[in-house]
Image (cartoon, rainbow, N blue to C red):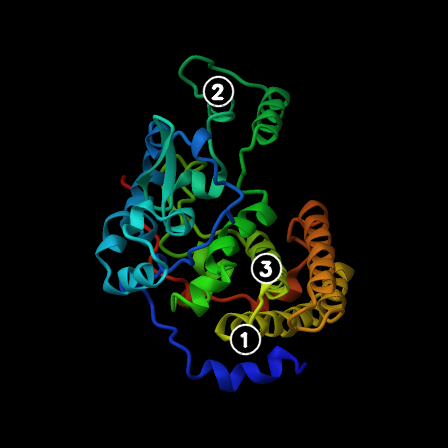
Amino acid sequence: MHSLRRKASGHLASLWLGALGVCGVLAALGFAAGVSLASDAAKTVGANACAECHKQETEAWKTSHHFKTFREMPRSKKANEIADKMGIRRIKSGTICLDCHYTVQQKDNRDEPVSGISCESCHGAGQDWIKVHSGFSGKTILFESKTEAAARWKLSESKGMIRPRSVYQIAKNCYGCHVVPQEDLVNKGGHRAGSVFELVSWSQGEVRHNTWHSKGRENASANAARLRMLYLVGLGVELETALRSIAKATARKAYAFEMAKRADNARKQLAAAAKAAPGVPEIAKIVELAHSAGLKLNNERRLTAAADGISAQLTGISEKYDGSTLAGLDSLIPKPDKYKGTARKPDN
């Protein structure tokens, strides 16, 4: 069978890749069943529980498309056309819609959408960790040593909190929706196969809420070292996710072609990153793994093995590097004029 990549460019030209109509910048996420690491309706506490302390972060969220999708998406003509093709009568009750476009909370043994994409969509359902995380708030405990703080954060993470420093886990949540792992949704429903997504430009735009440590006085972009990690790990997760999607694809149709194109583009970008940062052998290994399996159907075993290997390398990169030694990547990283939307300025 010919490589899907060879057919991708010509075939994709005829695909419908339009946005949902409610998706100015960020809300054009892919529907997907059970893809988010953070999804657990039974343990979701809702954004209000976070807003009690994180007021500036909440205000930034409220100006984003992540927030607005809750009301706007059900009114979208395109979204409803896709739902009709998939046999979904109501968008807010269709599981494949809820998993990516909403925060879902279990109430009276029923899953109920309570907001758009929110805090727990990225940082994990909070029931088990929110009290530990907020145990030192300055209200009841006036002092916390570095040792005590480290222990508190470690316990929070063990209970499911995904902190900003966990770049790989954060990226997995983003790409879990921005790259659609639901074949029928694309081939049958006409949904786009995913956003033209890149972690730096999307995380540093309108969704940015870097205000906590500055006590709300600024919402600064991530520093250079952090941007390097976001860029590198984001590319790796794009590749990993695309390979897993090809592995599960069953038909030589739009979905498979688009995923092959994504994988090939990511391979090329990572090859450039490996050249720019030769002191990071893990990048070259990722590129090697990416070429170890053909981008074709009926190749699940090899594609999955390649994706698993890439995952292991990305985990190692996240643990070993902090970005300070990756300056060679700077010329490849999108600049502020490429950021998606404008970050909110905090209240004075």
Which dot, 1 or 2, sits closer to the camera?
1
Q: Quadrant of the N terminus?
A: bottom right
Closer to us: 78 or 251: 251
Asked if labels 3 and 1 touch by Cβ distance under 8 angstroms, the answer is no
What residue is shown at x 57% (from left), y 58% (from top)?
A: 234
Tell me how far mark 1 sits from mark 3, CA to CA. Answer: 14 Å
What residue is shown at x 47% (from left), y 66% (from top)?
A: 335
Q: For the residue labelled by badge 1, is the local secondary structure a helix, a strand or a loop? A: helix
Mark 3 neighbour density, 10 Å: few (under 14) some (14–19) many (20 or more): many
Tell me how far mark 3 sits from mark 2, CA to CA. Answer: 37 Å
Which dot, 1 or 3, sits closer to the camera?
1
Residue 241, label in figure: 3
Residue identifier under label 1: 257
Give the residue furthest to the front: 87
What residue is shown at x 50% (from left), y 67% (from top)?
A: 334
The vertical placement of 14 against 26, above or below, is: below
Q: Quadrant of the C terminus?
A: top left
The vertical placement of 80 against 210, above or below, is: below
Residue 285, label in figure: none
Residue identifier under label 2: 136
Q: Is residue 19 visible?
A: yes
Percent x, y for residue 277?
A: 71, 65
Percent x, y for residue 124?
A: 49, 37
- Kindly identify the amino acid type of the residue bearing the numbered disc 2: Phe
Q: For the residue labelled by badge 2, is the local secondary structure a helix, a strand or a loop? A: loop
Which comes sooner in the sequence, label 3 or label 2? Answer: 2
Closer to us: 329 or 108: 108
Which dot, 3 or 2, sits closer to the camera?
3
What residue is shown at x 36% (from left), y 45% (from top)?
A: 102
Tell me how far mark 1 sits from mark 2, CA to CA. Answer: 50 Å
